[in-house]
Image: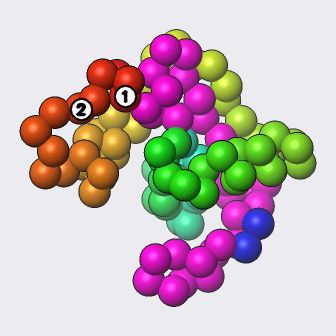
């Protein structure tokens, strides 16, 4: 997939750098992670959260074309929780809607 970021940067999201994650009972944390750089075991990249309007189409494409995926996980990793709660969608809100929990 060829993507354009909000700042106009072009990104190629392929099977080598992109993975789909879903969580049972924690749909707010569903996301696609696109790795831009690997430093040892640390991956640096971008999240496309489930509430993003592009997410459904991207996720369907990834499933159809056998991208790596981790589906229906029971636990959201601490790093994903931190990324979500410091993302622009959550910052500045007084609460997290119940359907996101």
Between residues 24 and 70, which one lies in front from this camera angle? Answer: 24
Image location (x, y in percent) of residue 88: 28, 57
Mark 1 → mark 2, Cα distance in angstroms = 7 Å
68 horizontally vs 22: left or right: right
Where's the N terminus, which quadrant?
Answer: bottom right
Where's the C terminus, which quadrant?
Answer: top left
- Pointer 2 local density, CA inside 10 Å: few below 14, some 14–19, many at least 20: few
The span shown in magenta is 3-30
78 to 42, vertically: above or below: above
62 horizontally vs 65: left or right: left
- From this viewpoint, is residue 19 visible? no
Image location (x, y in percent) of residue 8: 51, 86
Please say whether residue 13 is one of the residues in the magenta stretch. yes
Image location (x, y in percent) of residue 50: 52, 42
48 horizontally vs 95: left or right: right
Taking the spot 65% from the left edge, 41% from the top edge, the residue there is 20
Image location (x, y in percent) of residue 92: 13, 51
Q: Which disc is residue 96 wearing?
A: 2
All told, the count of numbered labels is 2
Mark 1 highlights which residue? Answer: 100
Contact between labelled residues 2 and 1, with CB atoms less than 8 Å apart:
yes
63 to 23, vertically: above or below: below
Taking the spot 16% from the left edge, 33% from the top edge, the residue there is 95
Taking the spot 54% from the left edge, 23% from the top edge, the residue there is 23
- Pointer 1 local density, CA inside 10 Å: few below 14, some 14–19, many at least 20: few
Between residues 29 and 83, which one lies in front from this camera angle? Answer: 29
35 horizontally vs 66: left or right: left
- The local secondary structure at tag 1 comes to helix
Please say whether residue 33 is one of the residues in the magenta stretch. no
Taking the spot 76% from the left edge, 61% from the top edge, the residue there is 14
- From this viewpoint, is residue 45 visible? yes
46 to 29, vertically: above or below: below
């Amino acid at each position: 997939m060829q993507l354009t970021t909000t700042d106009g940067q072009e990104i190629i999201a392929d099977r080598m750098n992109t993975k789909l994650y879903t969580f049972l009972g924690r749909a707010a944390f569903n996301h696609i992670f696109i790795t831009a750089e690997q430093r040892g075991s640390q991956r640096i990249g971008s999240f496309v959260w489930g509430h993003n309007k592009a997410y459904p189409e991207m996720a369907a494409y990834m499933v159809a074309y056998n991208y790596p995926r981790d589906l229906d996980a029971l636990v959201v990793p601490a790093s994903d929780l931190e990324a979500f709660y410091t993302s622009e969608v959550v910052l500045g809100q007084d609460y997290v809607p119940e359907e996101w929990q």
